[in-house]
């Protein structure tokens, strides 16, 4: 069972990586699109500015205006030299300065946007590679997981059946605790390790919703009463109270505020194994979750076995 739990946790981390790469890739592609437009506009502006400069130079040449600003600065050897010459001339024509500055400005904008496009394309390629690697890991681990499950599914089914009566008893106790908790006032507690005060939970009611799904089979990628994975269960029950959460643990961790172990309240999200697994705290040191392939939604203790050993921390959802 532990091997399957570890595989499911590893799958969730791979999905975190895949989904995170997708989010970053979307941002990069948006930046690329904006910069392509900006580069096109800057190039068009540069053409116009260069045309204006050419016309002004032609005007100076044909009028023999050797005292003009442009005549003074025609000897410039670089853009920096050009700018220095402009700044050194005391009796500059504002028209000439504007014409030159436009060319300099648009030339620089073209260069900056070209460099940004190169940087973004490299980032895009790296993210595509990261996403492909995560997808390959997911495919490989799914195959390993299915093979392992097929070899021990009889044993898992027997253990799940044996757990049924105990799970019903745990659910009754949890419902009684929840009713008592909701009838009392609860103040926020200070986490002494961070000095951060987590606000009281608004969503203890999700525990009662989650309890309705005890015994629903684990389905990787599932987020409905026909089958849940760990983050899918959390996402679904919070959706029932109007709170939209993403369907992967890394993003769910980022949605809430940190909660000390000693300050856990019903409805808090509890995370394990490097954000490879998530469940809902229900009080009394217990949580409800969708454990792994072959198992069903059930209640477990935070202080026992693999969950105690791999506990990462908790988050409290404070708004939708």
Image (tube, rainbow, N blue to C red):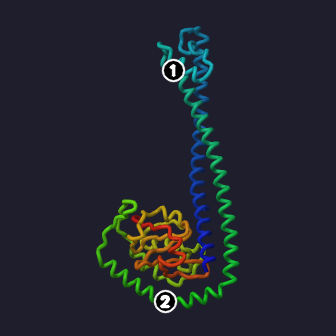
Q: Is residue 228 above or below residue 248?
A: below
The earlier-in-sequence mark between 2 and 1 is 1
Residue 50 sits in quarter: top right
Q: Quadrant of the C terminus?
A: bottom left
Residue 231 visible to the viewer? no
Residue placed most toward the observer, 277 or 306 = 306
Q: CA distance from mark 2 to mark 1?
A: 85 Å
Name the residue tied to disc 1.
97
Query: Looking at the rendered structure, which numbered label has been put on residue 111?
Result: none
* Rendering coords of residue 98 (x, y %): 51, 23
Q: Residue at x 63, y 49 (%)?
A: 123
Residue 4 visible to the viewer? yes
Crowding around mark 2 (Cα neighbors within 10 Å: few <14, some 14 to 19, many 20+) is: few
* Rendering coords of residue 318 (x, y %): 39, 65
For the residues bearing labels 2 and 1, Cβ distance under 8 angstroms: no
Residue placed most toward the observer, 254 or 77 = 254
Horizontal relation, residue 243 to residue 27: left or right: left
Residue placed most toward the observer, 134 or 162 = 162
């Amino acid at each position: 069972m532990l091997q399957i739990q570890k595989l499911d946790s590893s799958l969730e981390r791979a999905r975190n990586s895949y989904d995170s790469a997708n989010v970053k890739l979307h941002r990069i592609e948006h930046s690329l699109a904006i910069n392509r437009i900006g580069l096109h506009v800057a190039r068009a502006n540069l053409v116009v500015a260069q045309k204006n400069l050419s016309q002004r130079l032609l005007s100076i040449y044909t009028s023999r205006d050797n005292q003009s600003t442009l005549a003074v600065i025609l000897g410039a050897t670089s853009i920096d030299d050009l700018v220095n010459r402009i700044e050194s001339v005391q009796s500059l024509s504002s028209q000439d300065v504007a014409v030159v500055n436009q060319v300099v400005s648009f030339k620089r904008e073209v260069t900056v946007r070209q460099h940004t496009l190169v940087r973004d394309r490299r980032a895009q390629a790296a993210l595509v590679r990261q996403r492909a690697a995560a997808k390959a890991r997911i495919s490989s681990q799914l195959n390993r997981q299915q093979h392992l499950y097929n070899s021990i599914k009889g044993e898992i089914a027997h253990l799940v059946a044996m757990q049924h009566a105990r799970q019903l008893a745990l659910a009754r106790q949890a419902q009684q605790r929840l009713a008592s908790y909701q009838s009392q006032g609860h103040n926020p507690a200070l986490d002494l390790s961070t000095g951060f005060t987590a606000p009281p939970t608004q969503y203890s009611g999700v525990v009662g919703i989650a309890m309705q799904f005890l015994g629903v089979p684990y389905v990787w990628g599932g987020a409905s009463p026909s089958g849940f994975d760990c983050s899918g269960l959390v996402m679904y029950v919070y959706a029932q109270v109007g709170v939209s959460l993403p369907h992967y643990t890394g993003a769910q961790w980022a949605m809430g505020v940190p909660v000390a172990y000693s300050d856990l309240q019903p409805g808090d999200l509890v995370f394990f194994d490097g954000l490879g697994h998530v469940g809902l705290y229900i009080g009394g040191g217990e949580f409800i979750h969708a454990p792994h392939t072959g198992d069903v939604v059930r209640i477990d203790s935070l202080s026992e076995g693999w969950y105690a050993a791999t506990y990462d921390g908790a988050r409290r959802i404070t708004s939708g």
